[in-house]
Image: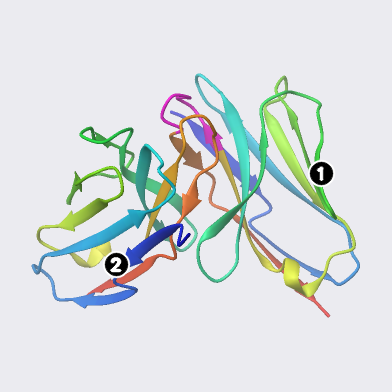
Amino acid sequence: NAGVTQTPKFQVLKTGQSMTLQCAQDMNHNSMYWYRQDPGMGLRLIYYSASEGTTDKGEVPNGYNVSRLNKREFSLRLESAAPSQTSVYFCASSDPGRYEQYFGPGTRLTVT
Amino acid sequence: EDKVVQSPLSLVVHEGDTVTLNCSYEVTNFRSLLWYKQEKKAPTFLFMLTSSGIEKKSGRLSSILDKKELFSILNITATQTGDSAIYLCAVDLTGANSKLTFGKGITLSVRP
């Protein structure tokens, strides 16, 4: 069991470039989440997906899009990266029968 | 606006000390409160609390929730250098989707 995996681990983008962060889980969880973590800000929810085929905005969705490709995979896309999107991005998943979320190792993104 | 406030924001102690980490919340539709430990990478789940006054315990860590006063504490006794981490408190508001609102985290440093 790999749990929650994320690719890439690190990425540097120039302002205006686009990229997709990938997330996959092998725990058969229905719900998946994308967070960003900035120094002194804790974790803030960007988007979440309660089940395959559904997505909803979280606290900070502007500048991002998501796709729930299937039950296992949930991707986060930055269409036109901005320096304000420099952050560490975490993907998480959870089972609707249990409250705790399981996190991936994170992607450190720098936008110059 | 839903708020989760953790205090202190950072703490330095010596090995063997006991520490108390605080989390207070002002939210609508509270369902549960969760504590996570974050070392270098992904947050890992510690405790989930739903009922007031019932202590959850795991080794040297324990936590309790007061739903009347809207706070929780996380205690760590006989601290070790391996306890150095960021401790995150989160509140589950919606229930069905386990959508978490996190506090900013408490950085604990345990010195030998």
Letter of the chain that mark 1 sits on in the rendering: B
Instruction: Identify the residue at horizontal 65%, vertical 36% (top origin).
Output: B24
Could you say whether the residue bearing mark 2 is in a helix, strand or loop?
loop
Instruction: Identify the residue at horizontal 31%, vertical 48% (top origin).
Output: A72
Instruction: Identify the residue at horizontal 45%, vertical 62% (top origin).
Output: A2
Which is more toward the observer, B64 or B96?
B96
Q: Which residue is mark 1?
A: B57
Q: Is residue A29 above or below residue A75?
A: above
Residue A86 disc label: 2
Q: Is residue A88 visible?
A: no
Task: Name, please, the residue furthest toward the bottom.
Answer: B112
Q: Is residue A22 above or below residue B82?
A: above
Which is more toward the observer, B6 or B61?
B61
Letter of the chain that mark 2 sits on in the rendering: A
* Quadrant position of the C terminus of chain A in the picture: bottom left
Circle 2 or circle 1, nearest the eye: 1
Labels 2 & 1 near each other (Cβ < 8 A): no
Could you say whether the residue bearing mark 1 is in a helix, strand or loop?
strand
Q: Is residue B8 visible?
A: yes
- In the rendered image, which quarter is residue A82 located in? bottom left
Q: Colour scheme of this structure image?
A: rainbow
Does the magenta portion include B23?
no
The segment highlighted magenta reads: B91-98
- In the rendered image, which quarter is residue B94 located in? top left
Mark 2 residue type: Thr
Horizontal side of B24 relative to A14 (left or right) equals right
Q: Disc 2 versus disc 1: distance between alpha carbons?
A: 37 Å
Instruction: Identify the residue at horizontal 14%, vertical 76% (top origin).
Output: A14
Residue B1, x across and y down, in percent: 43, 28
